[in-house]
Image (cartoon, rainbow, N blue to C red):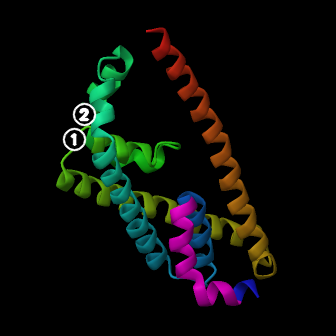
Amino acid sequence: MLTELVLQYGYLMVVAGVVVEGDATIVTAAFLAHRGYLALGMVMALGALTSATMNQIYFRVGRRHGVDRVAKAEGRPLFATILRHTRKHAIWLVLISRFIFGFRMAIPMTVGAVGMGALKFLVADVFGAMVWAVVLGLTGYAAGQAGALILTDIKANEWTVALGLAALTVAWTIYRRRHVQEVTTILDRTDSLL
């Protein structure tokens, strides 16, 4: 039954999955591409397109609702330092935002709020989305290849491996999210002291 669902709605599932949790979706879909259920190129293209589209939305939200908030908070010393560095390194932040857990939405919103140009953001974001999709796509595909070498009869275990890969990616995501929360709490406390 799961096989039929993937065959019928696999690419739609990739798009919906990238909106919710991009890393796990791309790695798992690329593994399934290795198994022949999806096309790797299509998985990476849809992942990049969906991710770039979502970032455009976040950027616009930041541009529309964040500019006034940035102006009000610029007098706080720590915040002013963060803004200065954000403006200085905005392109690099956009390029690597998908690889920095916990900042996937925050970076596009922030660079929108601090006034990064829309065209500059679009170019950096599309390039970053392509790099992200290819790196994770090849990682998932390589996991499929490694699984084929490890398991003698992968056909009987492919869904177990795919679910295991998704579970490992989600566990890693939860771990990273908690770590980012700790760092954010430290920054908030430091800012309140200043």
Q: Is disc 2 surrounded by few (<14), some (14 to 19) or many (20+) residues within 10 Å?
A: some
Image quadrant holding the C terminus, namely top left
Residue at image coords 76%, 88%? 1
Q: Which residue is mark 2?
A: 87
Residue at image coords 43%, 43%? 106
- The number of numbered discs placed on residues in the rendered structure image is 2
Residue at image coords 42%, 68%? 50
Range drawn in magenta: 4-20
Q: Which residue is mark 1?
A: 115
Residue at image coords 64%, 70%? 144
Query: Is residue 23 visible from the viewing direction of this image?
Result: yes
Query: Is residue 89 visible from the viewing direction of this image?
Result: no
Chief SS of the magenta region = helix
Residue 126 image-quadrant placement: bottom left
Q: For the residue labelled by badge 2, is the local secondary structure a helix, a strand or a loop? A: helix
Determine whether label 1 and label 2 are within 8 Å by CB: yes
Callout 1 amino acid: Gly
